[in-house]
């Protein structure tokens, strides 16, 4: 499906990909098929207010229609605020937020993820923090705190533990970030 | 009383003055803080949760076990940490197969997730464990004469099923309001009270759209409440409201500035903390409102 078709709302059903729904169910979106497209979730969603082309209800609709490329070519799934207003209001307990996360999981398996997510994952692995500012030591000292918080950054053993955990997760199998000792990033703001 | 302080990334690196506020306020109210040594990122939404459920829960579980070993609940001031940790706990507690897979991973590092520690947001914890009256008795300074607008924060409210501390109705939140009123403030209602501020994944994905949301909120606050101060319940909201106003002013979208503090910073000030330590990193000009609080003018 081309982006023109998305923009004009014309959907070519014959291009649909029926494997997408199954993948979503396997990656955490078990309740997908419960959705009745009532759009209560859309009425509560900040992505709608901000003007993103895809949001909970439309993402689910696109998954039903198998519009994999339309979802992968657009940044909307990465703008979801994880706020769970949709989960709260959904009358069918679909957990729309989890379906968007599952769609991100599909995208990641096709290496269609934003640079910031890659950097966040790398920073998480290297420092234990997805958001990490190398220069924060000065700021912390300024307000009377030790330069490092009592986290993995001040505790090499804890960082090793965390890395051992991450190496046993799907992230390691996907090979999205290098998991060797080198290349610690200076700063990462996700 | 003792509780584990989960400091998270943004608070530790971007707003350590908020960290300092927590480190001041809890002991001042008679609650000891444990550092949960070796804690990591919660993990945040754009990282492990976007890769797979078990990996998300495994990184979360490692954090949970640090608190479990000490027999402590976890408190945080960050909505994202609160949401991610509470959701990973909920998933593991309600899905034995997820918990089993996570514990298989944790076995290698000699840990086991049991599910014995609760995840609490700092101000809910104080509200439920001490209550507004006790807090009122403990403060040296009050917010008398100040009008505030609130920003509770998405993750402090939804999804209510995963949280230990619940609002009676998360679409009409009361706790932050009652806390501010107990401290003496007048709390104004505005139409966009429970809207999202646009911080987080949206801001990383599309700055312009993110700013549009915070602009709508600020204008609603200004027109309907005209507050002396914005009080947030979440560290991410704090960063968004504190940094976006200058961007919106330079883009000619707004022509005002409202000082912004997190509820724990306000509380620390009221309990007698050094303002430089607990509010010193604000980008909005908070000096006047801080002086009003300290001098009771
Ligand atoms: S996810 Fe729930 S609220 Fe949204 S359209 Fe489907 S059934 Fe309705
Ligand atoms: S979690 Fe995502 S999809 Fe659901 S309401 Fe929030 S922003 Fe919208």
Image (cartoon, coloured by chain):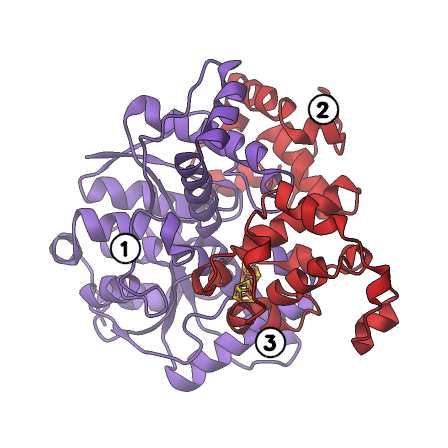
Chain colours: A red, B purple
Residue placed under numbered mark 2 in the picture = A179
- Nearest to the observer: residue B54 or residue B277: B54
Ligand 1 picture quarter: bottom right
Q: Is residue B131 above or below residue B114?
A: below
Q: Categorize mark 3 by other alpha carbons within 10 Å: few (<14), some (14-19), many (20+).
A: few
Separation of disc 1 and disc 2 at Cα? 42 Å
Separation of disc 1 and disc 3 at Cα? 29 Å
Horizontal and vertical percent for residue B212? 61, 74
Horizontal and vertical percent for residue B29? 19, 44
Mark sitting earlier along the chain (1/3): 3
Q: Which mark is residue B249?
A: 3
Q: Is residue B199 above or below residue A102?
A: below
Identify the image quadrant of residue B75.
Answer: top left
Name the residue located 20 percent from the left edge and 68 percent from the top edge.
B184
Mark 1 against mark 2, which lies toward the viewer?
2
Name the residue located 12 percent from the left edge and 58 percent from the top edge.
B133
Subunit that carries the residue with mark 2 = A
């Amino acid at each position: 499906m081309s982006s023109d078709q998305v923009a004009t709302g014309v959907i070519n059903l014959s291009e649909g990909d029926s494997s997408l729904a199954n993948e979503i169910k396997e990656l955490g979106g078990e309740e997908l098929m419960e959705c009745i497209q009532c759009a209560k979730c859309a009425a509560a969603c900040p992505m709608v207010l901000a003007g993103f082309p895809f949001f909970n209800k439309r993402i689910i609709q696109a998954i039903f229609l198998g519009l994999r490329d339309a979802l992968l070519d657009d940044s909307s799934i990465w703008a979801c605020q994880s706020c769970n207003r949709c989960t709260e209001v959904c009358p069918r307990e679909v957990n729309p937020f989890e379906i968007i996360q599952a769609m991100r999981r599909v995208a990641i398996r096709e290496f269609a993820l934003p640079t910031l997510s890659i950097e966040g994952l790398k920073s998480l692995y290297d420092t234990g923090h997805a958001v990490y500012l190398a220069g924060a030591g000065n700021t912390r000292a300024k307000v009377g705190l030790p330069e490092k918080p009592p986290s993995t950054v001040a505790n090499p053993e804890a960082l090793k533990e965390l890395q051992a955990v991450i190496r046993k997760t799907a992230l390691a199998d996907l090979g999205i970030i290098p998991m060797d000792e080198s290349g610690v990033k200076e700063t990462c703001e996700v | 009383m003792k509780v584990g302080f989960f400091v998270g990334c943004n608070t530790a690196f971007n707003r350590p003055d908020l960290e300092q506020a927590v480190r001041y306020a809890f002991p001042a109210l008679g609650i000891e803080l444990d550092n949960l040594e070796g804690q990591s990122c919660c993990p945040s939404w754009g990282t492990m949760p976007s890769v797979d459920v078990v990996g998300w829960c495994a990184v979360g579980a490692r954090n949970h076990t640090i608190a479990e070993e000490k027999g402590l609940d976890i408190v945080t001031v960050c909505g994202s940490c609160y949401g991610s940790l509470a959701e990973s706990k909920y998933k593991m507690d309600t899905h034995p197969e997820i918990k089993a897979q996570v514990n298989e991973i944790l076995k290698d590092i000699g840990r086991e997730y049991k599910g014995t520690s609760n995840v609490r947001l700092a101000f809910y914890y104080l509200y439920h464990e001490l209550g507004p009256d006790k807090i009122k008795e403990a403060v040296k300074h009050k917010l008398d004469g100040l009008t505030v607008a609130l920003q509770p924060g998405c993750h402090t409210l939804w999804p209510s099923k995963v949280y230990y501390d619940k609002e009676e109705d998360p679409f009409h939140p009361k706790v932050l309001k009652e806390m501010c009123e107990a401290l003496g403030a007048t709390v104004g209602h505005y139409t966009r009270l429970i809207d999202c501020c646009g911080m987080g994944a949206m801001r990383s994905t599309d700055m312009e759209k993110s700013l549009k949301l915070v602009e709508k909120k600020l204008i609603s606050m200004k027109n309907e409440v005209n507050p002396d101060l914005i009080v947030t319940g979440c560290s991410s909201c704090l960063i968004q409201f504190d940094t976006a106003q200058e961007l919106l002013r330079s883009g000619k979208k707004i022509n005002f500035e409202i000082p912004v503090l997190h509820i724990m910073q306000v509380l620390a000030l009221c309990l007698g903390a050094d303002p430089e330590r607990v509010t010193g990193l604000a980008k909005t000009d908070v000096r006047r409102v801080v002086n009003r609080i300290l001098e009771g003018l």
